[in-house]
Image (cartoon, rainbow, N blue to C red):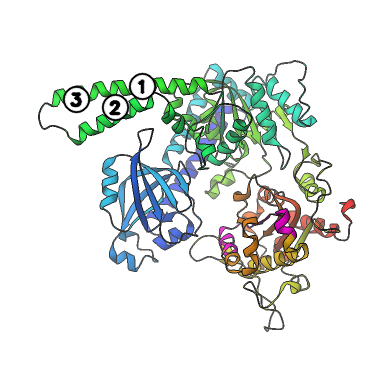
Amino acid sequence: MPASSILWLQQQKQLLEMEYKYEREQFRAQTETAGVARKVAQGYCWYPLNLGRSYYNSLNQLVVEVERTEHTDQDHGFEPGKQVCFFTQDASGEARRGGAHGGLLHYFKFTATVSYVDGNMMVVALPDAEALARLRDGERVGVQLYLDETTYRLMFEAIDRVAEAKHGRLAELREVCYGVKPAGRFTFQPLRFPWLNPTQEAAVNEVLRAKDVMIVHGPPGTGKTTTLVEAIYETLHRESQVLVCAQSNMAVDWISEKLADRGVSVLRVGNPSRVNDKMLSFTYERRFEAHPAYPSLWAIRKAIRDLYDHRPSGGREAFHQKVARLRDRATELEITINESLFNEARVIACTLAGSANRVLAGKKFSTLFIDEAAQALEAACWIAIQKAGRVILAGDHRQLPPTIKCPEALKGGLDRTLMETIATRQPGVVSLLRMQYRMNEAIMRFSSECFYDGKVESAPEVKYRGILDWDTPMEWIDTSDEAQTAPYLEAGTDTALPSASDTADAPDFSEALNPDSTSRTNPQEARLTLNVLKGYFTKIGKERILQERIDTGIISPYKGQVQLLRSLLRRDPFFKPYRHLLSVNTVDGFQGQERDIILISLVRSNESGNIGFLHDLRRMNVAITRARMKLILVGNGRTLCHQPFYRLLRSYVRSLAGRTPAEG
C-alpha cells in the first residue's frame, strides 16, 4: 500500500476506472453483438415480455409490471435497484434471434430501475409517462440489464471527496482507515451479556469503545449477525439513531429483519429484495404510504397529473400558477411526512449506494454499521462513510470478495476491500469471533486451520453432530479414480451414467464450455453428483429425511453446472418427494446459508490442470463451510490437485476415513 492515503485512493480510482470501462465495453458487446437467445441464457435478458398494469407508487414513481413468458426456469441477474433498458425486435429478428444480429434490436432511449422481482414477474420504475406509452406501442418487447452508471458515479464522487478532504471528520477517518493515524478508543469497564459467548461479548464491548473504526470479524457459523444486532441495540442506548448499510439488498433485508425481531424501529430505504409483508412493513415506501398526511399528498399529485392531461390551450399563466401552488403544497407535505418517518426510526437501513438516496440528503449519523463489509468495494463504503462520525464493519475477508470483472483491475487489487485494508493496517481494531455453532468439528477444523490460524473452535453442542452413526463428515468422490466412481454408475435412472462394461472406455468426466454463455459444465459429473446423493439418501431412509426435514444443498462454482443440475433434478422422479428440502445454487448464492448436507460439484476436469477461478480459495471456504453435518465433494483430483490447497484438502479428507465420530 502507498504510504500516503491520497496516493492509495488515487490508485483505487484508477482501478475502478478500469473496471468501469471494462464493464461498459462488455455491455456494448452484449447490446450490439450478442443475440437475444445468448443474452437470455446468460441471465441478462427477459424476452419476450407481457406488459401488465401500470400505476404511480407512493413515491410518485410511474411503475409497470412485466412478466416473462418463455425460459421461465432460466436463472437471471435482475434484482431490485438494478438499471435496465427495453428493446423491441422486428419480425426478421424473430426468426434469427439465436444469432448475433444486434442490428435487429431497437432500444428505447430511456433507462428504468427494477423496483422488485417476484418469480417471473418484475416491477420496473419508468422515467415518465412517455416511456410507458412507447412500451405500450412496441411489439415483441424485451428487457435487459443496463450498465449501472449511477453507482459508478457515486463511487467516483466519494473517492474524490475523501481524497480532497483537508480537515474535519472525513479526513480523520481516512487517515485512521489507512493506518496513518492510530484508531482511538474509549476506556470503561466491560459490560456483561450472559446470553453471548465470551468472544461475542468482547466484540460488542469493542464496538462501544471504538472512537473511529472497529471490525467484527465473523468466520462461518460464529454468530456474526447476532453479535452485530446486539452491538447496534447497545449503541442505540447511547445514540438516538444509527445508519446500517450493506453491499446488497439481500444483506440489508437480513439485518433489518433481525433488528425488527429485536424490537428496534427500522426504516428501510431503497428496494427490498424479499417481497413479503414483514419486509415491506418497515420500508420507507410502505411507511410513507401509511402516514396520515399521505391521502392529501396523493390527491394533490393526482390533481397535478389531471391538470397536465387536460391542459387548456389558453390561460397558460393561470395554469402554471395553479400547478406551482399545488407543487409547493405537495413539497410541504412530503417534507412533513419525511421528517415524521425519520424522527420515529432508530435505525436507517439501506445499501451503501442507497445511502446517497435523496431522502437521506444532508443527514449525518454518529455511527455507521456496514454489514458484509468484505463483499463491498472500498469506494462503495466511502459513499456511506461520508455521513458518519465513526464506522463499524462486520464480515469476513476470508470469504467471498467483491465481484470484479476486469482481469487487470483484479490483478491490481480492486477486490481488496476497506475491511481487509483496515484489518492489515490497524490490527488492534479487529475482534475475531471464535466459537462456531454450525459445523461438525471435522468440517470446521479444515477451514479453521487454513483460513483462521486454527483460532476457530466448535461449540460442544455441534462438535460431533452427524446424520448416520460411524459416518465420515467429509468425503471426496474423485472422478479421476474409477474405483471411487464405479459404485455410482447405475443404470435405469434419469441420471444414469454408462459403466465401463457398457462402453469401450470409462465415462468421460471432462468439462465443457457452454456455447450460449461463458460458464462451464461437466455433464457426467453432474449426473454422478446426483447419484452420490441418491446413495446417501438411501442410507438415511426416506421416512427419516422427510420426518426430520434433513435439508440438502448442491453447490457448484459455475452457473452452467447449476442450471444443468437443476434440470436433472426436475426430471428425476427419485427426488420428487425431497424437492422442498433441496436447493441448487452457486457459491455466491449460498453465501450466509447452511444445510445439513452439502454436495459440491467442482466441474473443472482437464489435462492441463487449469482450474480458473477455483484459484480463489475464499470462494471454496464459503462452499465447504455451508455444511452442518455432511460434506461431499465431487471433482477431478488429478486436475484440482495441481493447486496446493486442493492437495491439502484431499489429503485432509482421506485422513478422516476410518475415524470414529468421537475422534472427529
Residue tagged by mark 1? 333
Residue 141 position (above or below residue 524): above
Which of pointers 1 and 3 lies earlier in the amino acid sequence?
3
Residues under labels 1 and 3: Cα distance?
20 Å
- The picture quadrant where one finds residue 213 is top right
The spot of residue 650 in percent (x, y) is 78, 59
Q: What stretch is highlighted in magenta?
A: 544-566
How many other residues sit within 10 Å of disc 1, few (<14), some (14-19) or many (≥20)? some
Q: Which residue is drawn at 50% across and 60% down?
A: 73
Disc with the residue nearer the chain's start (2 vs 1): 2
Mark 1 falls on what kind of element?
helix
| Residue placed most toward the observer, 591 or 428 | 591
Kindly identify the amino acid type of the residue bearing the numbered disc 1.
Leu
The residue indicated by pointer 3 is 320
Please name whichever residue, 107 or 65, is drawn nearer the observer in this view of the structure. Answer: 65
State how far apart marks 2 and 1 are (Cα): 10 Å
Mark 1 or 3, closer to the camera: 1
Dot 3 and dot 2 residues touching (CB under 8 Å): no
- Disc 3 or 2, which lies upstream in sequence? 2
Helix, strand or loop at disc 3?
helix
Residue 316 position by quadrant = top left
**Callout 2–callout 1 Cβ contact below 8 Å:** yes
Q: Is residue 520 above or below residue 260?
A: below
Total numbered circles: 3
The kind of residue on which mark 2 rests is: Ile
Q: Does the magenta stretch include residue 457?
A: no
Please state if 415 lies on the left or on the right of 433 as rendered.
left
**Residue under numbered circle 2:** 300
x and y, in percent, of residue 186 in the image: 70, 16
Q: What residue type is labelled 3?
A: His
Residue 275 visible in the picture: yes
Give how far across and how far down residue 631 sits, in percent. 74, 56
